[in-house]
Image (cartoon, grey):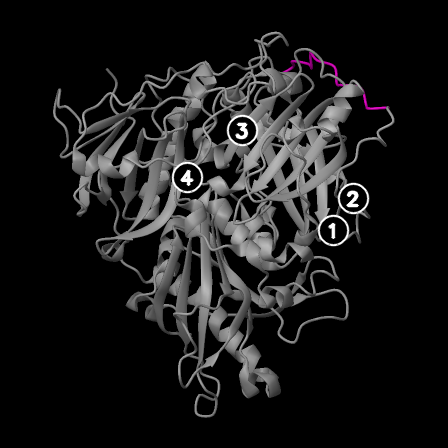
Amino acid sequence: MTGPTMEGWMVRYGRRKIGRSYFHKRYFVLESLILAYYKRQPSANEVPIKTLPIDGNCRVEDRGLETHHGHTVYVLSVINKKEPSHRITMAAFNVQDASAWKEALEQVIDQYLNLHTTNGSMTFPPSVCKTQEDPDRDASSSDHDSQGNSGKSQPDDDDDDKKQNHHRNRTVGNGMSVNWFAHNQCIESIEDWSRGIDPRWSNLNADAAASARRHWHLVRCQNGLRFFEEVQDGVQAGRCKGMKAVGVVEASCADIFELIMGIDETRYEWDCSFHEARLVQEVDGHTTILYQRLQLDFLPMFLWPRDLCYLRYWRRNDDGSYVILFRSKEHPSCPPEPGCVRAHIESGGFTISPLKSHPNGDPRARVQQLVHIDLKGWGANYLPLCHYHSVIQILNSVAGLREWFAQRDGNCSLPSVPRIPKLGTAKTRKRSALQNVASLPEMPSAGQSNYDESEYDDDDMQFYADSEPNFISKNLNATESVSEPPPVSLDLSMLSGNLGKGDLDNGKNCWSIPDCNNFRVRSKHFLIDRSKTAAGEPLMQLVAVDWFKDIKRIDHVAKRKGCVAQVAGEMGLFTVAFNVQVPAASHYSMIFYFVAPKAPQGSLLQRFVDGDDNFRNSRLKLIPSVPQGSWIVRQSVGTTPCILGKAVDCTYYRGSNYLEVDIDIGSSTVANGVLGLVFGVVSALVVDMAFLIQGNGMEELPERLIGAVRVSRLSLASATTPPEAD
């Protein structure tokens, strides 16, 4: 019997059936394939309060920050996708412990999938494959049935876990249910951003619609920081330019993040522009609305003080970096205060990225703060020095962070939950060879870091944040055993959607095909030297894009009469359709149709098309990019590759001549936060997306794109009603 993979004190909270709430510390143990918790540290043969089997049907959801009984906690929810009522919700008092538990749980799930998932050696003949005529196939078709809840439960600790979610729990075709996320308050808790565009957001991105991405130039060095000012091409530069400060702080990313997120008296010790702040509304675990009053020292006897009401969004990336974004937001509970001028944050925030640790193991982080603010009032309008001096004062908080951590002694460390073993970084942890899942290997220290700031520029930092391979082939000289599919050479003029194709650089409300060499994918020798290479020509050809809007979610478009996938099938082509669903009061869907002849037998593409849903969810990858857009939008979207099945809820529909992937953006609170920042200004953005299947073995490398698409300055009003389902 091996020891536990991870254990320690965490928090359980919820509401009893009689209506009273509870907030208890519980001792959690992750052992082999079981997650359990106890009232106290368990002794031999002690029965847990509740257990949850961990297998390929489980998903770890990051629910962000929540406040319960006066405590701010970081919440995780472990959900069985087939049985959403089978879940355990747990919380930590600091982000380090929440991240450590999330990584440990995902490691167990990944190792289970690597040992039990169909990897393509088994294919499904058409006679076995269910098609669109069986739309109500239940999740019982899974190859790995859920084991249910085998443990005993107590009412006060289980009521919160029995809440049902509203997301679908089915699959069509030769696959399994993929209800990875079960966030039952996602749509209700986030504001309806689709009902209208904030005019202030339109002003923010007016320049972005006329010029390419903004650049930065160094304007001064002060207090150990580098200060940059944005430079925009064209003649429509705004009156108030954005500025940013970049510095190195001798602390871990998690510690810096927790200090920045605080709005208590500790902020006076490092933020010289802070006067007071209060919480206005908690939108969800990643998004809040705050009020803050600034304390600016430029002619305070003559200029009125400034205050702000702004939306704050945050997320943690897989590489251990953090992004905190701000933008002004009007709120009925936060009117302008008497005696203050309401300033306007057009964009702003922090990025906290890990750097290579010191030889003695002390962590370091690169902190970047951006401020693009209009201070309003006559002082800012007629005294340019007022704006410049005030922004420099705000940006000097990066130096305040550095000095706060430099002078902190050992007794001032941030609190942590005891008795939680350290975990290695995602990069180090996933390099080890696969072991028996019942006897997981010992994980290295979480303090290790392999990032070097010299590899990245100031604006767009790249990390190996996608899932790393779990093994390296013994035969490093293995060659490709599968030939590449031949290029499409048919007349594709009959294939068209309701969104037109336009110019690559200056198009508006259209799609185009970007240069695929701009996307970096894993090279042939990635498992040896972690190198990446230009993607090259895609495996399939993008032929059409549909842009739909309806009062309900638009599922399984490929089976509808007259759909591009149906027409392509009559031409002897196979279609892979990606249906990106954006749910709200009005549900939007954008469908990308990629066509090609049948994939060669045994190829990675064929294994993806005919594999099970566990395989699909562990391999389908998206690489996003925002060539044109504001800093806050580019930071919120990022450029890090993302395994879609691990980030949002995906459903797969396998037909005789197509595979449709429905990607429900609304199933993730993190994705919803990004939508709240991006969707209102989509008419000023140019977004690139590349879809591919992740290669984990030498025989699967180099990676090849399924296809890529650019969507330019989309108009919400151009969405049409989809054809009726048969």
> Which one is nearer the viewer's eye here, 477 or 113?
113
Q: Are marks 1 and 4 in contact (CB under 8 Å)?
A: no
Asked if one can make out residue 523 in the rendered structure from this viewpoint, the answer is no
Residue matched to label 2: 500
Q: CA distance from mark 2 to mark 1?
A: 8 Å
Instruction: Report the disc number at residue 509.
Output: 1
Q: CA distance from mark 2 to mark 3?
A: 27 Å
The numbered mark, 2 or 3, whose residue comes first in the sequence reads 2
Tell me, yes or no, whether the highlighted magenta stretch contains residue 66.
Answer: no
Q: Nearer the viewer, mark 1 or mark 4?
A: 1
Q: Dot 3, crowdedness within 10 Å: few (<14), some or many (≥20)?
A: many
Instruction: Report the disc number at residue 651.
Output: 3
Asked which secondary structure carries label 1, the reply is loop
As displayed, is residue 380 above or below residue 466?
A: below
Asked which secondary structure carries label 2, the reply is loop
For the record, the magenta segment spans: 476-489
Q: Dot 4, crowdedness within 10 Å: few (<14), some or many (≥20)?
A: some
Q: Are marks 2 and 1 in contact (CB under 8 Å)?
A: yes
Asked which secondary structure carries label 3, the reply is strand
As displayed, is residue 69 above or below residue 92?
A: below
Residue matched to label 4: 448
Residue 426: horizontal and vertical position, in percent? 45, 34
- The secondary structure making up most of the magenta span is loop
> Which one is nearer the viewer's eye here, 9 or 680?
680
> Which one is nearer the viewer's eye here, 255 or 493?
493
Residue at image point 29% right, 68% down = 265
The numbered mark, 3 or 1, whose residue comes first in the sequence reads 1
Q: CA distance from mark 1 to mark 4?
A: 46 Å
Q: CA distance from mark 3 to mark 1?
A: 27 Å
